[in-house]
Image: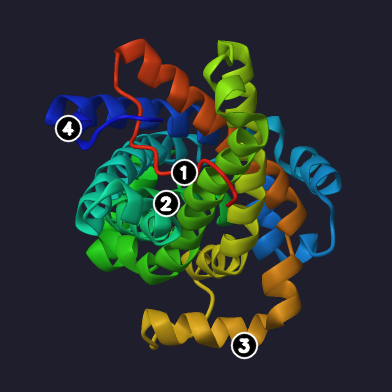
Amino acid sequence: MSSSNTSITPTNLAKDFAAGALAACSTHGAATPIDVIKTRIQVDDAMKGLNMVRAGRQIVAKEGASALLTGFGPTAVGYLVQGGGKFMGYEYFKSQFINLAGSQEKATQHRTAIYLGASATAEFFADIALCPLEATRIRLVSQRGFASGLTTGFMRIAREEGLRGFYSGFIPLLFKQVPYAVGQFSVHEAAVEVIYRSMGSERKAKLTKLESTGVELSSGIIAGAAAAVLSHPADTLLSAINKGAGDKSQSVTSRMFSLAREFGPKRLLTQGLGPRVFMTCGLVAGQFVIYAQCKTLVGAPPGVEIHKESSK
């Protein structure tokens, strides 16, 4: 990913958006069955303590195999928009923060802060677009019979609850998605740096396309595990809030903290974590591989690289 900041043009940002949208939409869409099972384990008391396989079998036995695709529509559309905005935003804000650092050398010295700031800022804006569709998805998954699909579910929330219904989970969504993005991008950058540093600049320059994909895949798996762990507590709270849990007379923030006290650390940190780590490792690794391939296909330049070349 070595390029100058002059690569940040509207045309190239549009290419980044398209590549990110395809990467996020395809991976999240494919992971819908896992996400359905994970969400049910988090919010359905009857499934507490079940592992992913047993919970999946129980859902299929009671509701049929099609239940595992519940929420596919809002998942695909939501992450099409959010993924494009997140990846494009990360490239843009990373470039801007590098400019603010004053030089490539200073940017390299403060690269972790740049990764954290760029990923968090990009995610914030992407979540504004994601939140209404995520609220619809959670309702479809956690409240059986709520609606028949994306359009009917979206319209029911709009009709019965208005804007507040779509954004009641916005703050918990930020608590979930921002740590997720920070883990995804920052840990990925760090893992790529370690891998490239271990092989040396000469070996790095001779990497084949397959070997480069292997680097993206390996670093993506590591980043996925970090993203899952960092975002899991808020993910559990978001699922519960969108299901209607908690005192609705409270503000969203108060409701979130009340539910956190009610659930306790063990449930927040561990319930449904296994399926989430499994799913997120696949999602993040897949996204980075697809994103890199799509950028190459559309002729988008690589992002600005500020990795440290040696450990000295």
Label 2 to label 3: alpha-carbon separation: 24 Å
Quadrant of the rendered structure where residue 178 is?
A: bottom left
Residue count near mark 2 (Cα–Cα under 10 Å), binned few <14, some 14–19, many ≥20 = many
Sequence-wise, the earlier of marks 2 and 3 is: 2
For residue 269, above or below residue 10:
below
- Whether residues under marks 2 and 3 lie with C-beta atoms below 8 angstroms apart, the answer is no
Between disc 1 and disc 2, whose residue precedes?
A: 2
- Give the structural element (helix, strand or loop) at label 4: helix
Quick one: 99 or 310, which is closer to the camera? 310
Residue 103's disc is none
Residue hosting label 3: 261
Seen in the picture, residue 37 relative to 232 is either above or below; the reply is above
* Residue at figure coordinates x 29%, y 32% from the top left: 17
Amino acid bearing label 3:
Arg
Q: Please tell me in which quadrant of the rendered image residue 109 appears.
A: bottom left
Q: Do the residues labelled 1 and 3 touch (CB within 8 Å)?
A: no
Of mark 2 and mark 4, the one earlier in the sequence is: 4
Q: Do the residues labelled 3 and 4 touch (CB within 8 Å)?
A: no
Which mark is in front, 2 or 4? 4
Residue closest to the eye, 32 or 222: 222
Q: Given the image, on which type of amino acid does mark 2 rest?
A: Glu
Q: What residue type is labelled 1?
A: His
Which residue is denoted by mark 1 in the rendering?
307
Q: Which of marks 1 and 3 is nearer the N terminus?
A: 3
The tag on residue 134 is 2
Residue 6 badge? 4
248 to the left or right of 48 = left
